[in-house]
Image (cartoon, rainbow, N blue to C red):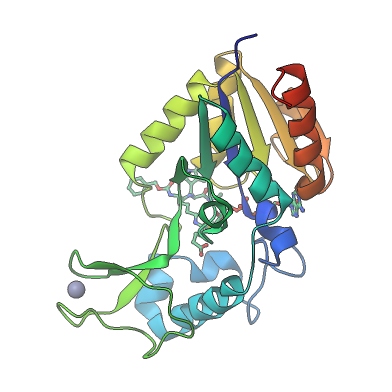
Amino acid sequence: MTLPRLVALTGAGVSAASGVPTFRSAEGGLWRRHRPEELATPSAFARDPALVWEFYDWRRQLIAGCRPNPAHLTLAEMDALLPHFTLITQNVDGLHHQAGSRRVLCLHGDIWWLKCSRCHYREENHTVPLRPLPPLCPCCEAYLRPDVVWFGEALSPSVLSRATEACAEADILLVIGTSALVYPAAQLPFYTLQHRGRVYEFNTEPTPLSGHVTESILGPCEETLPAWWCDFQNEYGLA
Ligand code: BJW
Ligand code: ZN
């Protein structure tokens, strides 16, 4: 039997069981009473770079202590076993790479990279806590910022076009642990549906996407995704 083209789109829920707070949950969505929409913007950084950096420094310290969970490991196994597989993530935590995934498109950047707010300087930086805060560019002394995509900023055109193409060509798209509220990521499943691909959603609760998908699998993805993958491997003789 020919193996289908499989694509996975992940959001913060995939890292929840690792201890990374999601953005829009009651317990994890607020940091010092600020909503992410108030901190993850260029205007917030222009207004108060120290506050925005405190938020990111706190998250970097928290994520540094987190490890991949069975959902990350299952996706890494798909990457290793399937000839046609693409992982698209909205997460910036690096846990997919830590789990062993190689073919990863990071739509919203990477919290472990910094870039200059003025010139083209970029560096990989895993230091926690980061000091001084805000860090300064070694080339031009402007503030460095996390190399992530904030609200109102464009995603990398090449990453977004590869993600769009992968979804449009997918036989099966797995949408895992995302509230499906943030665009353009939230649009991607519709490219698969338009091309008659199947879309399976894995979430602990229904989302605006749920009514459109082939099947909505409710429950923690660190349990439901390994179970789905087990059935898939049996069906296609991979087990
Ligand atoms: C579990 C679970 C478990 C829990 N198992 N499940 C069209 C319509 C309306 C608005 C727009 C539009 N197009 C663009 C916009 C504006 C805006 C937008 O989408 N706004 C909406 C909020 C309305 N989009 C943008 O601004 C984007 N840029 C853009 O479009 O640019 C255009 C442009 C073009 C040319 C020039 C200039 C501009 C950029 C969006 C960037 C988003 N950035 C962030 C921050 C990244 C850095 C950081 O991490 O700090 O990305 S915001 C935040 O949301 C982060 C996430 O990746 C993203 C998505 O969140 P996610 O992953 O879905 O998390 P949650 O918390 O929302 O959901 C978790 C889910 O998991 C829940 O459903 C739980 O139930 C579930 N869950 N535990 C399974 N164990
Ligand atoms: Zn610089």
Q: Place residue 63 in its image quadrant.
A: bottom right
Q: Quick check: 203 above or below 199? A: below
Residue at image coords 70%, 63%: 18
List the single residue furthest toward the front: 239
Residue 178 can be seen, yes or no: no
The residue lying toward the viewer, choosing from 70 and 141, is: 70
The residue lying furthest to the right in this view is 219
Q: At 43% from the left edge and 26% from the top edge, which residue is drawn?
A: 165
Given residues 116 and 187, the one toward you in this image is 116
Residue found 51% across the figure and 41% down from its top = 88
- State the quadrant of the N terminus: top right
Q: Position of residue 182 (x, y in %)?
A: 56, 47
Lateral position of residue 190 relative to residue 119, left or right: right
Q: Which residue is more in the foreground, 46 or 149?
A: 149
| Residue 168 position within the rendered picture, expressed as x and y whole percent measured from the top left | 49, 21
Left or right placement of residue 31 versus residue 39 in this view: right
Q: Position of residue 123 (x, y in %)?
A: 29, 68
**Quadrant where the C terminus lies?**
top right
Which residue is painted at 65% across and 33% down in the image? 174
In the image, is residue 69 above or below residue 38?
A: above
Q: Position of residue 118 (x, y in %)?
A: 21, 70
50 vs 85: above or below: below
For this view, does 124 lie left or right of residue 61? left
